[in-house]
Image (tube, grey):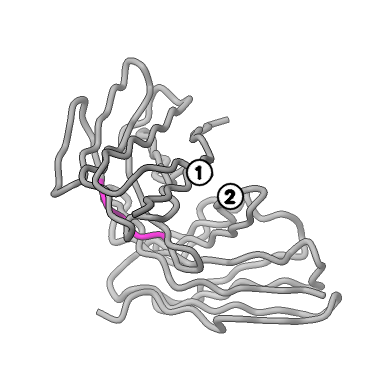
Amino acid sequence: DAGVIQSPRHEVTEMGQEVTLRCKPISGHNSLFWYRQTMMRGLELLIYFNNNVPIDDSGMPEDRFSAKMPNASFSTLKIQPSEPRDSAVYFCASSGSRDTFPLHFGNGTRLTVT
Amino acid sequence: QKEVEQNSGPLSVPEGAIASLNCTYSDRVSQSFFWYRQYSGKSPELIMSIYSNGDKEDGRFTAQLNKASQYVSLLIRDSQPSDSATYLCAVTASGGSYIPTFGRGTSLIVHP
């Protein structure tokens, strides 16, 4: 079991640039979550997919953020255009069932927007 | 709005002592409760889950749940410096919403 795989581990970009974060969930897991973590706000849910379908995207900050899950083994989170306030650690997590957590987290992507 | 509250700490305890971490939640229909440990610069990892009132023990860890008072706690016995981390409380509700709500975490420091 390779765990949840995220890439890149670190991303430094300039304001206004497009950023794409990638996630491969654990094979067989059908729930996928994107979280953002900052010192000020803690761990915030951005979007939740179940069986590749977005179920709850109420945490997506604004239209600059978008997420896709084209198949069961891949998801992306895109920020366009990026802003300095988007700087945070972005975690992807997956779960095997809606009824049985826990979430298995990836190692995260540390995003810095200058 | 569902809220999960934790004291941010830091909670400082000497090695060998019992560390007590607390969490309160606002949603009365919450059903599942989890404690995650997060080392600095790392991702959260599950250490305990509890679903019914009472205590659940796993090694040096004991989770305690009191649904009437809407709190869940984590006790760490014989604390070790390696237990120094941030501990996140997470709560999920029944009724179709299985999305966990996380507290902001309590920083624990175990000093030798």
| Residue drawn where x is 72% and y is 74% of the image | A112
Q: Give the quadrant of the C terminus of chain A.
A: bottom right
| Residue drawn where x is 52% and y is 32% of the image | B2
Q: Which residue is outermost to the right?
A: A16
The residue closer to the viewer here, B11 or B2, is: B11
Residue A45, x across and y down, in percent: 55, 52
Q: Which residue is outermost to the front?
A: B112
Q: Count every numbered label the image shows and give the total.
A: 2
Assign the magenta stretch its main secondary structure: strand
The residue closer to the viewer here, B97 or B82, is: B82
**Looking at numbered disc 1 in the image, what kind of residue is underneath it?**
Pro
User: What secondary structure is marked by label 2?
Assistant: strand
Q: Which residue is label 1 attached to?
A: B10
Whether B59 is among the magenta residues is no
Q: Which residue is label 2 attached to?
A: A42
The chain letter under disc 2 is A
The reply, left or right, for residue B59 in relation to residue A35 is left
**Looking at numbered disc 2 in the image, what kind of residue is underneath it?**
Gly
| Residue drawn where x is 37% and y is 33% of the image | B95
Q: What stretch is highlighted in magenta?
A: B44-48
The reply, left or right, for residue B81 in relation to residue B9 is left
The label on residue A6 is none
